[in-house]
Image: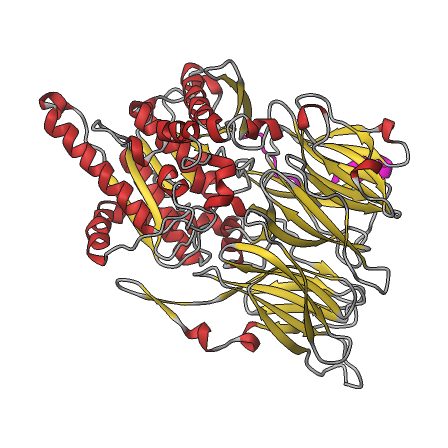
Amino acid sequence: MAAVSSLVLIRLLTPSRLRFRQLAVCQRITWLSVSTRRRYSSHTSDSSVDHLSSELERYKDLKKFFRKRLRATYHRFSNIADHSVVRGHHHLYFFEEDGIYRVDARQSEPEQVLNLGQVSRGDERTEIQNEEKKLRVQWTIQRIRLSPQEKHLAVTLKSNHSEELRCVVVRLERRNCPPSSPTHVILTLDKVLSFEWATDDVLFYTTLESLRCSKVFCLDLTSGGSRITSVYEETLPDVFVEVALSRDQQILSINCNSRTSSEVLLIDTTKSNLEPFLVQPRQPDLLYHVEHWRRWLIILANTGPGQEYQVVQAPLSEPHMLSWVSLFSPNPGTAVKDMDVVGDHCVLVARTRASELVLIVVPLTHPKEAYTLQLPSWACAIETKKAALADQRNVLEFLISSPVHPPVSYCLYPEDRLLSPRTGVENPSNYTTTRLQACSQDGTLVPVTLLHEVPLESLRQAPMLVHVYGAYGRDLNMEFCPEKRLLLEKGWALAYCHIRGGGEQGLSWQRQARMEGKPKAVEDLQACLQHLFSSGVSSPSLTALTACSAGAVPAGALCNRHPHMIRAIALQAPFLDVLGTMEDPSLLLTLEDREEWGDPVGNPKHKLSITSYCPLHNITPQNYPSMLLTAYRSDARVPLAGVLRYTEQLKKAIRTHFTMNPHSECEKAPNIVLNIQPGANHFGPSDFELMLEEEALKLAFLHTELALDPPRAPRKRKRY
């Protein structure tokens, strides 16, 4: 599957999915944007942390209640559908907490291929010191790749409290050994992010350093030993490099992407000479992604109308842009999100104007006969399965889900125009997905997805949790989340605002809210809230807002401009100092991020724009919503010092407001709470118990600040 956002996307395991692995064998792989990375640079004192963290005590009792409820909810969904089983030619591979196992038709017991203890080093015993407890670093399996004839296996591991990555290479083939002999770990490679087998003995991989991949290496095992050579090194500081394998496993690509341009090199794995060759040299504002079909390249490029994506074709022997021939362009208002080649068909994942998901199938032999398949109306997220060695090449397996609907496995048979579920579909009739459109200040219609249990006309007294992101061309995360299901079952309405800056409506949707256009994202969020209230959904006193990372920018800006529109806000690893970060080129990723936020040093208009909305630099004496800010002590993307600075200035402004306004006694003072977690995982804790603590605190905070009665535990039925 080709990633088609203007961001570079990498495969990592999201924290929400890691949570299920603590309860069952339920691991899946998803696309996550590197570009959610944000950071500050100064240090902080433990005394200030202790002072701010003491405010967590008021939620202590309610947090215990929600932790118990969350645990029960996660157990209810511990057997959800996933793509954790990998089909090899001879075995099925699956994951357990302690490692990787395989089984074939003749084996009654699974065989362990890799035990995580085999790759333990002294640094696994390193403990991260927190104020009152020590946390042992553990490793979690991220993804595995089998070599073409199942001779070798490579797997990446991630530390649960840091950014550390490790790749382990295992020899599966047993020469002159009895069947019971153990598999052999050949070597471990540090900092490996993306990796693919070109042959049974040749592995290409990238390394992650300073939150960026710029180098590609080749591991050659043909001589019986191991030889590592450098293949490619990117010199541009804003380009991220990854390796990927085509679905038919004949072409390995080196994808070099910035936020606004692409350059792809290919390696033909069917030839003995594994030297990369260039498809199309980089040029400004050209984005493209490559798949392979019968010695042709199927390319998704933003050369369509309005610089949106269309499908083009070129011979493998002449891949440059002069040879590109258009095959298919989607209708206006339909945004292509992903592309795959399945048999003789190109399959596109797309979103409509209302942000509904559809599949567009383009027969590569007769592209004019393209057709569209509707997915269930509740589908909000899709995850396609990367083809394993023994998977059928003419079938596309994928999962669809929503924040409140567990993943359901589907199969697409494009030759037969057949779309069918592989597992039983839970009846979602109790939960309604309503698609709305809010009119922003400039007349642009902004999609809103509303999830609710009671009818729309009965939602005026319902508490509402609003979600927002709106940056880097990345769609708002709408995968299944048991916490959201719990809220819905307790009468909450869940609103997802697809504001500009994100990617829901295509590349132009992001372009409209980049650099000087960033204030439009704040205007869109305001319009979404106003439209929800005017439609009879909740009210400001019952509304909370949540966001993570760069999503904190429109959320924080709204709090400065219209603090009375919401009662509470919960931010995770929040990016709050846009101006200070973009002014400091020494910080990681600042040069790259200027393509998104602008350059306040070299462009006065950019500085004026950033200054108009930057959350930290627009704090003013007034009453604010209650706020829960969750930060991670060693987060390189959003270090703790910047969140502390924002928290201190916000509290100072609130104190000034109440001091200067004698009539403010009738107002309820907000609670500004900082929740500091150990580790450096920008995406939240992967440890299940730590996750429960964090989510239980969030639910306790929301119920307390919205003055809601805590939900009662379900009664146990008496037995007679």
Rendered image quadrant of residue 672: top left
Q: Residue at x 64, y 77 (%)?
A: 185
Residue at left 41%, top 57%? 680
Q: Is residue 665 left or right of residue 57?
A: left
Question: Where residue 341 appears, x then y in whole percent?
Answer: 79, 43
Furthest residue in direction right, as rendered: 365
User: Residue 426: within the magenta?
Assistant: yes
Whether 656 is drawn above or below 675: the answer is above
Query: Taking the image as drawn, is residue 543 in sight?
Result: no
Q: Is residue 374 left or right of residue 10?
A: right
Identify which residue is drawn at 51% across, 13% down.
443
- Residue 292 pos. (x, y %): 81, 47
The quarter holding residue 195 reads: bottom right
Q: Is residue 131 above or below residue 32?
A: below
Q: Above or below — where is 126 with respect to 179? A: above
Q: How many marks?
A: 0
Residue 222 at what x, y percent from top left?
78, 75
> Is 20 or 151 nearer to us in this picture?
151
Residue 627 in the image: x percent, y percent? 29, 37
Please give left or right for residue 475 compared with residue 245 in the image: left
Q: Which range of residues does the magenta coloring cover?
A: 413-430
Q: Quadrant of residue 281?
A: top right
